[in-house]
Amino acid sequence: MPSTKAKSLTERTGEALYDMILIQKQFKPGDKLPNEFELSARLGVSRATLREAVSALIAQGVLVVKRGSGTFIANELPNIGDVSISSIDFMRVRLSDLYEIRLMFEPQSVKLACERADDSELAAIEEQSKKVNRLLRSDGNWPDADQEFHEMIGAASHNEFISRLFPIINSAVHEVMLVSTNQKLLKDIVRRDNALIVEFIMKRDGDGASHAMSIHIRHMINALKLNS
């Protein structure tokens, strides 16, 4: 768990960035944020500290990540009174809620997919898993591909509510994963756990797939320190 000093520095960095965007208006909605090297030098902090501050502002809707393009000021900024910079704690609260929801319905979703999906849907899920692995090996945009992998499982459950809910939850989760400083651990978890999930899916072993999905989500919770 980060030290009080580290938290305090991240909090101050977040407040400085927040001030530049919402108070001083140095950036307009839709503007691209300067690169990490430039912005960290401007704020006088390390790039790791900057990433944590940026993550908190992403979680609050001040910043958005556009895959392959960078981090941008949101087109519609929240009201000043709605934004509370409390370092990474805010992000942890929000992410812990999202992962709690995932833990509640994703294991059941993959079980339904094993029972209801046709062979072509299962083959597509398996192929998407291979795509995730290729991107993991090449340092490509694996979070996007992994998000699609989970959404395909949701769609294969043939439950309309789950199909609609998946993109909302996964989008919020992966926005923050993109700027996580623990990429190696996250990639190792995704590579290992997805392989086990797919193995059970292809056997149409609903109980095994459900258990594997539950373990995967708990691995992610631990990696992101959402239980501390």
Image (cartoon, rainbow, N blue to C red):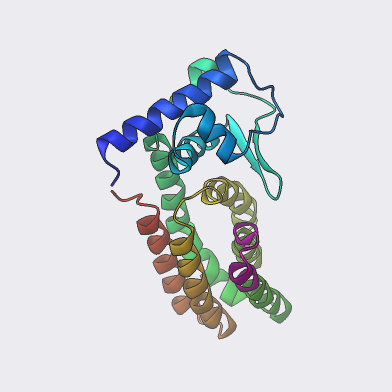
The single residue placed furthest to the left in the displayed view is 4
Task: Please tell me which residue lies in front, 92 or 31.
Answer: 31
Residue 90 location (% of width, % of height)? 41, 35
Quadrant hosting residue 28:
top right
Helix, strand or loop: magenta stretch: helix
Residue 168, compared with residue 147, is above or below; it is above
Asked if residue 202 lies left or right of residue 103, the reply is right
Toward which corner of the image does residue 198 lie, by quadrant? bottom right
Task: Specify the segment rendered in magenta.
Answer: 132-145
- Which one is in front, 55 or 12? 12
Q: Residue at the location (67% across, 71% down)? A: 131
Query: What residue occupies the far bottom of the structure in this picture?
Result: 203
In-image side of 203 versus 134 (left or right): left
Residue 12, visible in the rendered structure: yes
User: Is residue 227 shown in magenta?
Assistant: no
Which residue is pictured at 47% across the width and 69% down the height? 188
Residue 86 in sight in this render: no
Q: Which residue corresponds to the image point at 48% horizontal and 74% vertical from the top-left?
A: 192
Looking at the image, residue 63 sits to the left or right of residue 212; the answer is right
Q: Position of residue 55 (x, y in %)?
A: 50, 39
**Could you tell me residue 97's position as x and y percent?**
42, 44
Task: Give the percent coordinates (x, y) of residue 17.
Answer: 52, 25
Counting every numbered tag in the picture gives: 0
- Residue 138 colored magenta? yes
* Residue sitting nearer the eye, 158 or 129: 129
Residue 143 in the image: above or below residue 35: below
Give the residue drawn at x 43%, y 56%. 104
Residue 29 quadrant = top right
Q: Nearer the viewer, residue 4 or 190?
A: 4
